[in-house]
Amino acid sequence: MLGVLIILLLALIRGFLISRSPETTVQQGKFEDILSALPQTQCGKCNYSGCQPYAEAIVRGEADINQCPPGGETTIKTIAKLLGRQVKPLNPENGLEKDKHIALIDETLCIGCVKCIKACPVDAILGAAKQMHSVLAEECTGCELCVAPCPMDCISMQAVTG
Amino acid sequence: MSYIDKISSPYIHSLTSINEVMRQVIFALVPGIIVTTWFLGWGVLVHCVLAVCFALAFEAIMLTLRKRPLQDFMYDGSAIITGLLFALTITPFAPWWVSLSGICFAIVVAKHLYGGLGYNIFNPAMAGYAFVLICFPVELNYWPTMLNHAVAGGSGVIESLKIIFIGLPYEGLDSLSGATPLAFTKSQLNGMVMLSEFSSGPLFGSLGGKGWEWIGLAFLAGGVWLMIKGIIKWQIPLIFIFILFALSLIFHGHDPERYASSMFNLFTGGTLLAAFFIATDPVTASATPRGKIIYAAGIGLLTYIIRTWGGYPDGIAFAVLIMNAAVPFIDNVTRPDVFGKVES
Amino acid sequence: MSSEVHTRFNRELHSFPGGLELKTHKELTNSKESLRTPLPDKIILPLQQHIGSPSETIVKKGDTVLKGQKIAQASGYISVPVHASTSGKILDIGTCQSIHIKSEQVPCIIIEPDGEDAWFELEPVTDYLSIDPEILQRLIYEAGMVGMGGAGFPAHVKLNEGTATAIDTLIINGVECEPYISCDDRIIREKADYIVSGTRMLQHAIQAEHCVIAVEEDMPEAFEALNALIDDDIELVTVPARYPAGGEKQLIKVLTGKEVPAGGLPIHIGIVMHNVGTAAAAFRAVTRGEPLLSRYVTVSGNVEDPRNLQVLLGTPVEHCLEQVGYHPRDDEAVIMGGPMMGKYIHDISMPVVKTTNSILVTSGFNRSREKPCIGCGDCVDVCPAKLLPQELFAYARAKDYEEVRALHLFDCIECGCCAYVCPSNIPLVKYYREAKTDIAIYEKKQAGYEHARHRFEARSERLDRIENRVDDRFDKIKTLSTDQDPVEEDKQSYIRAAVERMKQKKNKKKD
């Protein structure tokens, strides 16, 4: 009887210690790993200005881990594993996970205003003032930041196949 | 885009199946069941039937509630084995509701609430037994006495059924029931009685407990057959027996009057049943070869500790359950080296 | 040339972990002479019959080609050319079903044979043992040679890497371990001279110190055929019949006791291995100038006359099945390859390619329902790569790719031993293939993320630089307007002088 009670007591103490440990985990060191897990689209759907600010917010404990739609389930799982937290579904308020899309400029409508070029966070649009603008398909991450600034509404998102 | 073939290689199979494995285990249990019935009375058989019926019933209920295909899982034999092992561990004089509650706990809580076949952490039969042992210690204390080799106390089927369904008769209780050799040994040793003083009493046979030694041999035979057929692997039974044997040898050698002998430890109680049928349950035992050795050694060690210094005469059930909890950790640290491992 | 076993080499054989003893069913096909398959109606040549980058077509629709003419060139280092298997007209450059890598449509060239079977001009080389190894490698490359044991790795790459490092042993693999397949057995019995000479040629091509030909112990006629032709320069070894003894890493362990490093290649321990069929085809390519155009294929299983066939590459599977009396049935499947590692054929009009060693008609495929894993550990006992199949399965299903990688998923040779013994009937190999594909896709995505991050950071840096330059300019202008600093005084006078000069220049211009 005594033996069983001792074992139970040890188990309770250990369980208590384990349950408290996420707060004592050094989250600072994980910043790089969390940033690498994010898709680097800089789209802002997480309500932060880019992937780095979002990663910083996660580390500070201000942001939840399920706010990144382009990263989707894989990113949530990776970050959850890094921080020892529970996996949760993507927050629909930030957007929905969908297949990769890339931007396509309708060249018949483009007026060469460079507003989209300035908006693109990875310089994936080729062009200059009053010259034709074109999206470099291999560089486009599908962040959609170029769509809103276009005054001619000539940028559409096309699904990528294969 | 579906990039995997509808049917995948390999296209031939060894044609073993879970059902086949379970069937072999049930066959191996049969000699042990017969011998146990011979020595402990018809109650054993009644409890076997009762436990199996309860087990199948609860299995069907849980499968329906969890929306799993009844066809596949009902007849794979795992519930039947749980029932049989439970029935063989409790006393044949236990009331029917002990069996009901024990099996309910075993199947519903220990098996299905943990995920069902293949996902449970704790051995269901042992979990059920531990449950009834803690909840109903009194009812599990009455074991049939063994007079000669005859079926216990001369009680026939009707007598056993009466005991199970109505209760033990008040008068004649002392002649009908008593403690097991293990329990008796423990109480005597606790009472500072020397081993040699009581070890030639009516409860003790040549190898171990009277009658119990035959039961042990029957399960040993079944277990060895399973090992030969490759259904169970040698690591768990042999290491468990070896550790238990070695520990009791050391202590008995140190002080033969205060510690029970090795043969006694092996051939009483559920030792041999546990070695070949309970500890070897693949779902709850360790998966890696080295892990199996550690797992079995742990069960042997804990069994000896609980029997000698703990509060229960036969500690196997608790030993198994405690080691079940340690299995994920054991598996993690005993992974075999991959082929072509680079020395770092 | 003697007929007794050479015992100069006392090679100690080791055993590899795990493995299975399987019924071989080779007696169905291995005692019959191989048959030359007649010309089919269509020759379909996929542009990728090898590991590496797909070949690029150099012919167009309507062209006439001769037998052995190059119709697609290699693209890149790990690639080989493709040749026309017979003379005829290019019917189409289209797509066909290929299962070399996945079940999808791949580009191919379709030839309509003209029945003449007229050869292209051939350039045989007879002094193959004295010419430069690099020339030999070039000839083998030009012949479109790939590993004919089933993997399809371009042969010249192995030879090239071989001369770059010192090779201790060349092993010619005649250990045919998969049930039903006997094409290697037959090619040894019928073309032993090609194989022995081919071995010597390959040894010269990679300058290996030692040379071993290995056959399985249930191939005694093949052993005798080779034994009659070898001298002391080649060691002939028999290994016990156990699946998968013919696997590259497993055979190396058996013959040398060494284990290829996990995640590494045999070349890292100074060994190069080639299939017997590759040796024979390479010899033929060099000494007769004929590129790789045909191969031995075992057609076995539920057919009237199971036997080995000599098949032109690009022949539809259907045509091969017709030669042996095949009657389609509902509950049967046609497999390309053996029963342990083969791939299911959805459409039997697809062609035989360079890596097709067998076509199997079987009704024995696994159709029982998958039950949960009971942790019996039988799979751990049989894995020849010493992996933990049940843990791999659990993590692969949970899509935990880090754990799966840490458990050495990529050392899995997909032999199928684990799934064969599983009492719960779990198609383990399917899960591992899915996990490997998922990981490859994931890593490609990760690389994309890294790339996007670099571009973003470069852009941020560029914008910062522009902003700093503007700030600097502003600072300069601000400080220029204050008159306190004596140094500034000098600056101010300098500027005033400069402005004066400009004004004068302007006035001069006006005049």
Image (tube, coloured by chain):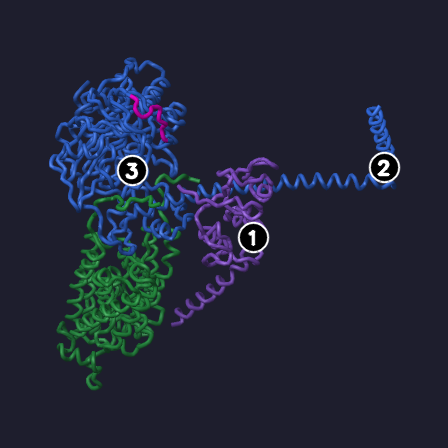
Residue A54: mark in rendering: 1
Q: Which residue is drawn at 18% across and 46% down?
A: C364
Q: Chain B is drawn in which colour?
A: green
Q: Mark 3 points at which residue?
A: C99
Q: Give amino acid for label 1.
A: Tyr
Residue A46: mark in rendering: none
Q: Do labels 3 and 2 share a chain?
A: yes
Q: Do labels 2 and 1 share a chain?
A: no
For label 3, the crowd category at 10 Å Cα-Cα, with few meaning under 14, some 14 to 19 and many 20 or more, is: many
Res C207 visible? no
Res C118 visible? yes
Q: Colour of chain A?
A: purple
Residue B302 % position (x, y): 35, 63
Residue C327 % position (x, y): 13, 39
In the rendered structure, the residue with mark 2 lies on which chain?
Answer: C
Residue C488: mark in rendering: 2
Residue A98 located within the stretch drawn in magenta: no
**Residue range (magenta):** C54-63
Q: Give amino acid for label 2.
A: Glu
Colour blue belongs to chain: C
For label 2, the crowd category at 10 Å Cα-Cα, with few meaning under 14, some 14 to 19 and many 20 or more, is: some
Q: For the stretch drawn in magenta, what is the main secondary structure?
A: loop
In the rendered structure, the residue with mark 3 lies on which chain?
Answer: C
Specify the quadrant that holds the C terminus of chain C: top right
Q: How far apart are marks 3 and 1 (CA)?
A: 44 Å
